[in-house]
Amino acid sequence: MTRQEIIEKLNDAFDMAIQGSTGVEKQYTEDSNLVTDLGLSSVGVLYVVIAIEESFGIRLDDVGFGDFQTVKDVIDYLEKKVN
């Protein structure tokens, strides 16, 4: 899976997690912070984790989502995990 394919799937997961959140900017970059820039609450993070696991057919058992600070951290992890 290419980095661009990973980004597209991940964008879908983020969009689902932040859908309906007030004040959340839906435009983000790889440098965007998951909590401060995307405004993900603990429930939002849970939704993202579930969406990632379902979209990519993987389990995030070997890391905690708190291990990721930015969108790039998640992409880099997924790039290693799915390839």
Image (cartoon, rainbow, N blue to C red):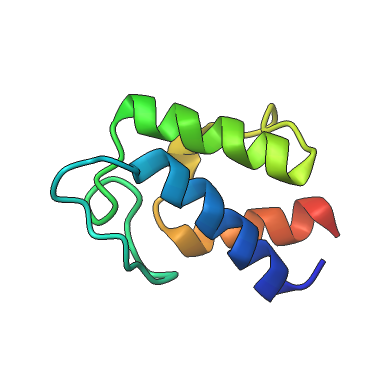
Pick the residue in front: 48 or 16: 16
Q: Quadrant of residue 83?
A: bottom right
Q: Residue at x 53, y 47 (%)?
A: 13
**Vertical placement of 15 versus 60: above or below?**
below
Q: Residue at x 24, y 56 (%)?
A: 37
Pick the residue in front: 74 or 28: 28
Q: Residue at x 37, y 33 (%)?
A: 44
Q: Quadrant of residue 40?
A: top left
**Vertical placement of 50 versus 40: above or below?**
above
- Report if residue 19 is visible in the image: yes
Counting from the top left corner in percent of width and height, residue 14 is at 45, 49
Counting from the top left corner in percent of width and height, residue 26 is at 31, 60
- Report if residue 74 is visible in the image: no
Q: Residue furthest left?
A: 23
Relative to 64, is 77 on the left or the right?
right
Relative to 35, is 10 on the left or the right?
right
